[in-house]
Image (spheres, grey):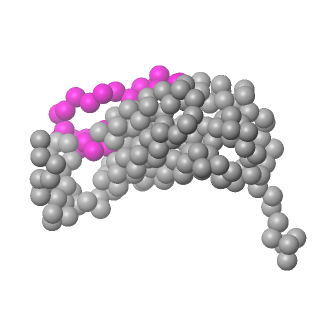
């Protein structure tokens, strides 16, 4: 298989199903943002974290690839049978969130990103996930997207937030709490 095809040199690409669209098309933006998210989640898995979390994020990466393939498909013209996204995938995220919630102290403040490089990587993945959710939601206004895709991305961003908290706890890193009006007091 050749890596370069030259078919995109004019600024267009083909969806699964053969439909040609400009590379700035909202559908391309949607699956491109999901792909970007997958890269950041891979970065998390490459860190020195526990094996259970690594296995979880690898499962998530696979599901994001499935979601990307759904988003890259022309909903009318594509005849390709794609892997399913189902409620069990969301239940897995919810269970992981609940497990982490049982470990970390209750939230009393908003948390600022940072404190450790690995925690920051998780926060980057979280905000990219939120962006992917916004782009997919926008696409859904123009061309229906399976509701479970939006639901999965929403739950994934919650998971990534909780993963930030879990990793901070495991690394014994103090979470950076948001304290409103700190700049007024310093002035």
Going by the image, does 147 lie left or right of 126? left
Going by the image, does 114 lie left or right of 17? right
Q: Residue at left 41%, top 35%?
A: 61
Q: Residue furthest bottom?
A: 187
Residue 131 highlighted magenta (yes or no): no
Question: 37 and 28: which one is in front?
Answer: 37
- Residue 138, x across and y down, in percent: 42, 53
Residue 70 appearing in the image? yes
Instruction: Work out which quarter of the rendered image holds the N terminus and state it.
Output: top left
Above or below, 77 against 101 in this view is below
Going by the image, does 7 lie left or right of 111? left
Majority secondary structure in the magenta region = loop
- Residue 142, x across and y down, in percent: 35, 53
Highlighted magenta segment, given as a residue range: 70-93
Q: Residue at left 11%, top 53%?
A: 5
Residue 133 appearing in the image? no
Q: Residue at left 25%, top 60%?
A: 23
Residue 71 highlighted magenta (yes or no): yes
Could you say which quadrant of the image residue 77 lies in?
top left
- Residue 173, x across and y down, in percent: 72, 43
- Residue 39, x across and y down, in percent: 41, 46
Instruction: Work out which quarter of the rendered image holds the C terminus and state it.
Output: bottom right
Above or below, 53 against 186 in this view is above
Question: 24 and 2: which one is in front?
Answer: 2
Q: Residue at left 57%, top 40%?
A: 160
Could you say which quadrant of the image residue 99 lies in?
top right
């Amino acid at each position: 298989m050749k890596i370069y095809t030259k078919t995109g040199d004019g600024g267009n690409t083909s969806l699964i199903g053969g439909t040609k669209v400009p590379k700035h098309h909202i559908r391309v933006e949607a699956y491109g943002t999901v792909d970007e998210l997958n890269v950041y989640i891979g970065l998390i898995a490459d860190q020195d974290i526990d094996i259970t979390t690594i296995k979880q994020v690898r499962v998530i990466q696979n599901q994001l690839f499935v979601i990307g393939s759904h988003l890259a498909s022309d909903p009318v013209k594509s005849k390709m049978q794609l892997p399913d996204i189902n409620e069990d995938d969301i239940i897995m995220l919810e269970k992981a969130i609940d497990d982490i919630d049982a470990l970390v102290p209750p939230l009393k403040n908003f948390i600022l990103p940072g404190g450790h490089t690995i925690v920051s990587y998780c926060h980057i993945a979280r905000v990219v996930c939120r962006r992917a959710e916004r782009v997919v939601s926008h696409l859904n206004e123009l061309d229906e997207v399976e509701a479970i895709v939006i639901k999965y991305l929403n739950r994934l961003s919650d998971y990534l937030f909780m993963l930030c908290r879990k990793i901070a706890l495991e690394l014994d890193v103090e979470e950076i709490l948001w304290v409103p009006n700190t700049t007024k007091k310093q002035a």
